[in-house]
Image (cartoon, helix red, strand yellow):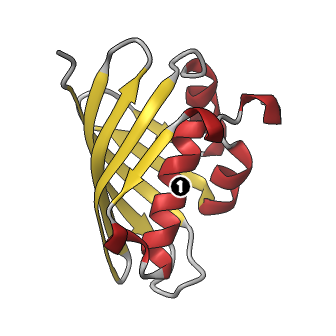
Amino acid sequence: MSEDNIRYDQVKIICAEDCGNAPKKELLRAFNVAFVCNDIGLITETIIEDIQWNFIGNNVLQGKAQVFKMLEELIDNKPTELVISNIVTHGYSGSLNGILNLESNISYAFCNIYRFNSSLNKTKIKEITSYIIDISK
């Protein structure tokens, strides 16, 4: 994927003010914005090589290659707005929930649960469990 596919200027990002007051909260905010905006570089920096991503009721991705393949498949879904409602972190764990609105009038409410590879500030995401609900009108 080239930088031409990064769409930061095309997506409205709304995040509660208290969501950025800790390094791990900032990591989760940045990761979710990068995911929505298709920023492979930032995603690469924030996840470990053998990441596991479990989409409840759907499938499990194992490793960066599968995550990037999923992003390739989602490239035609044009996001218009990401609303981050809450970010919570503690030790090796974190969570983030919000709503993603797409250009095609499709909206998803989601909650992601994260496991970090370290409890320290210089950490990466090693596991994600995603709960996603289509809330389109």
* Residue tagged 1: 31
Q: Where is residue 87 in the image (x, y as percent from the top left)?
A: 31, 65
Image quadrant holding the C terminus, namely top left
Image quadrant holding the N terminus, namely top right
Q: Circle 1: is it few (<14), some (14-19), or many (20+) Cα within 10 Å?
A: many
Q: Is residue 102 left or right of residue 67?
A: left
Picture layout, residue 94 above or below residue 102 = below
Q: Residue at x 48, y 40 (%)?
A: 12
Q: Position of residue 116 (x, y in %)?
A: 46, 70
Q: Which residue is drawn at 31% across and 57% down?
A: 96
User: Does residue 82 appear anywhere in the picture?
Assistant: yes
Could you tell me which secondary element the residue under label 1 belongs to? helix
User: For the view shown, which residue lies furthest in the top direction?
Assistant: 104
User: For the view shown, which residue lies furthest in the bottom direction?
Assistant: 120
Picture layout, residue 60 above or below residue 69 = below
User: Does residue 38 appear anywhere in the picture?
Assistant: no
Q: Residue at x 38, y 77 (%)?
A: 92
